[in-house]
Amino acid sequence: MTPPPTGSTSSRIGRSLPVTVRAAAKINLHLGVGAPREDGFHPLTTVYQAIGLCDDVTATRHGDGDGGGDRSLQVVVGGSDWIDLDGVPTDEHNLAHAAAIALGRLHGRELVGRLDIEKAIPVAGGLAGGSADAAAALVALDRAFDLDTSDDDLLHIAAELGSDVPFALIGGTALGTGRGELVESVADVGTWWWVLVPDRAGLSTPEVYRHFDKLFPDAPAEPPEADLLLGALRTGQPVSLARTLHNDLQEAAVDLRPELGALISRGESEGALRGLVSGSGPTCVFLCESADHARDLAGALLRSGHDNVLVANGAVAGAHLVKDHA
Ligand code: C5P
């Protein structure tokens, strides 16, 4: 690996400037869950899709005599007013902060600076917003600090940070195995339109997995395969995809939050091709025929009393640079 630059004046000045990286929310088109492994994690066969609902993470490098002040990493979180920002930690429990520590460790140095996280992805919503922030932070810090980390090392750190973080790096549509951290891109010829209904009160992922274990004590060791769904993705036809969407955690999430079942029925009766819980929930997602269809459905759900309804399409890119202020 290329060592970090020793710091010519021009590189120091240039790289003191902020770098902004965008990362997307994910939904699980297929989430097959097996019986818990010895380490407590559940084996998954999942198909992730990155959708156009994104957080931006800006990394600013301090140090090297630029008057950055405090010799540590500061995390500042802002975002849409309907997001529960109080629920987002700013210490090492924040996955983006943890990403900075892990990346610094790999390069044998402390990354002194600031991370500004601008959130549009709901917190604890089953959309992997924290994982998106971690992936964006890895890419932004790598560039802001001129670390030149290899893709393999970034993916390795991402997997240690959380099961969904490697997918947030690669984006698109991908098959996830292991505990979700082993990802490979899959063929996806469609543009898929989704209506999302987040819930103001988040749902804890470990709690949903624990409830799954209670409801399904005889879950198979091997999670259900995603072959039908992978075939539907290759047709580009929303009706085909709708038939194959699958989430083994849905029953547990709906058992914990019965109103999610009513929401899914409502969306389907308003014309969605299919509704399902996203990941461990509580966000529900509805597959539509087209952009117009998605906007119509969103209007109907708003009129029926849901005050926060979003429209997004997929698949979109993984963590990528949107602004290098240098
Ligand atoms: O990997 P991550 O930190 O995102 O996982 C959060 C929690 O979700 C884990 O601590 C575990 O309780 C649960 N989980 C699981 N099996 C997976 C992924 C997550 O049991 N494959």
Image (cartoon, helix red, strand yellow):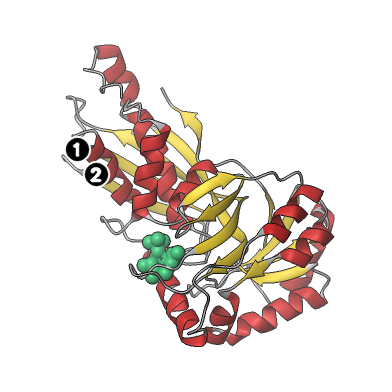
Q: Position of residue 56 (x, y in %)?
A: 48, 44
Kindly identify the residue that appears in the image at 38 percent across and 30 percent down. 150
Q: Position of residue 106 (x, y in %)?
A: 25, 37
The N terminus sits in image quarter: top left
Q: Residues within 10 Å of mark 2 (few under 14, many from 20)?
A: many
**Image quarter of residue 112:** top left
Tell me if residue 117 comes above or below residue 4 in the rendering. below
Kindly identify the residue that appears in the image at 34 percent across and 51 percent down. 160
Q: Which residue is mark 1?
A: 110
Give the amino acid at mark 1: Glu
Q: Which residue is mark 2?
A: 73
**Image quarter of residue 199:** bottom right
Q: Position of residue 67 (x, y in %)?
A: 19, 29
Judged from this view, the residue extending furthest toward the front is: 221
**Relative to residue 214, is residue 296 drawn left or right?**
right
The answer to whether the residue labelled 2 contacts the one labelled 1, judged by CB atoms less than 8 Å apart, is: yes
The C terminus sits in image quarter: top left
**Relative to residue 196, is residue 257 drawn left or right?**
left
Which quarter of the frame holds ligand 1?
A: bottom left
